[in-house]
Amino acid sequence: MSNLKASIDIGSNSVLLLIADLSNGHLQEISRKSEITSLGKELDKNLVFSDESMQATSIALKNYVFECDQFGIGRDSIIITATEASRVAQNAKSYFDKLGEELGVKIHIISSEAEAYFSTKGIVFNSKFDSDIITIMDVGGASTELIRVNTKTYQILDTISMPFGSVRSSQWLEDQYFVQNLQKVFVDFRSRIDSFQTKNLICVAGTMTSLANMHLERKDFIEDDVHGLIMKVEDLDNLFKRYSDFSPLKFNTLFPFLGKRSNSIRGGLHLVYHLVHRLFVKEITISTYGLRYGSLLEGRILKDHLHGK
């Protein structure tokens, strides 16, 4: 019997695929893919997914489902989650219902709490940490989660989800409202953010892994070199000083691995820089694991995991 499993994470900026062999408590990666579809682009203005973003997301999802077919993974067993942009967009449910019916899959819009749970499960799995209690930052396209977790029991001790991410921040920069909007989030979540202050921060997801690869000054993305990389806050400061005013074209010229992510990396850099300093972080550890790993390990989506249950 095949132990191959698949998970797909439909985020606010990218759609991610993981196919892995789960045997004897071990996870062996078979295929991992990432496609930038910018599903959360201009969502704050329009409150709906754009036709262009939906088309790009549909193509990415279809390609991933077809790849699962080639590995003999049943479409009804693919675990597909959608996060913050899908919690906000007024046309998310109708879009996913239609696409899911067309492909024979079920697309689950999960809650921010479930997103934190799955991200944590992916990060903690098969990893070692110096402390039993760690703090995780998960920067998405439209939201950023802070999570404090016990690595021994997998228990989430505290978590918050803030309505800013790399795509939203990039739009704010373009519209020249970044400072005002950032300050509003910091005021709205003031006491909650302060409770997550930490010297050591575990960072996950595409914005942080991309910034880590930029720190390494790589033109190609080598996941094994990024996973587990430790950055000092001074390293992040240097990235901000060098690249905070870069255009997407300049980002892509210097770092071709960014591809379409060049459109949102500046916003991500600004967001991370300010948030990390707000948390008084001294050291950052990068993880390339996250939600798609956690949902695959979990093996199912329960009703309690769903947004608006």
Image (tube, helix red, strand yellow):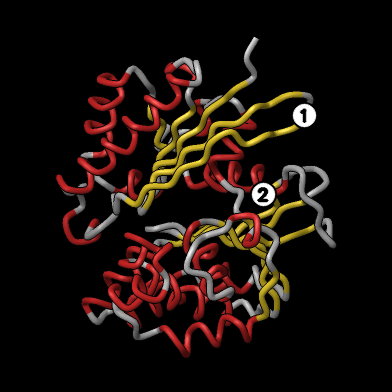
Q: Residue at x 51, y 41 (%)?
A: 32
Would you say 35 lies left or right of 45 here? right
Disc marking residue 123: 2
Residue 293 picture location, percent across and down:
60, 40
Q: Residue at x 34, y 70 (%)?
A: 252
State whether residue 110 is above or below residue 78.
below
Q: In which image quadrant can residue 222 be found?
A: bottom right
State whether residue 191 is above or below residue 76.
below
Q: Residue at x 69, y 34 (%)?
A: 27
Label 1 – label 2 distance at C-alpha = 15 Å
Question: Counting other residues with Cα less than 10 Å from the Cα at mark 1, is it few (<14), some (14-19), or many (20 or more)?
Answer: few
Residue 12 picture location, percent across and down:
36, 52
Q: Is residue 4 visible?
A: yes
The residue at which mark 1 appears reads as 25
Q: Nearer the viewer, residue 57 or 299?
A: 57
N-term-proximal mark, 1 vs 2: 1
Q: Is residue 165 visible?
A: no
Callout 2: SS: helix
- Name which residue type carries label 2: Ile
State whether residue 223 is above or below residue 181.
above
Would you say 250 lies left or right of 16 here? left
**Residue extending furthest toward the bottom:** 241
Q: Nearer the viewer, residue 98 or 218?
A: 218
Q: Residue at x 35, y 45 (%)?
A: 87
Quadrant of image for the N terminus = top right
Question: Counting other residues with Cα less than 10 Å from the Cα at mark 2, is it few (<14), some (14-19), or many (20 or more)?
Answer: many
Residue 300 picture location, percent across and down:
56, 25
**Residue extending furthest toward the top:** 1
- Name which residue type carries label 1: Gly
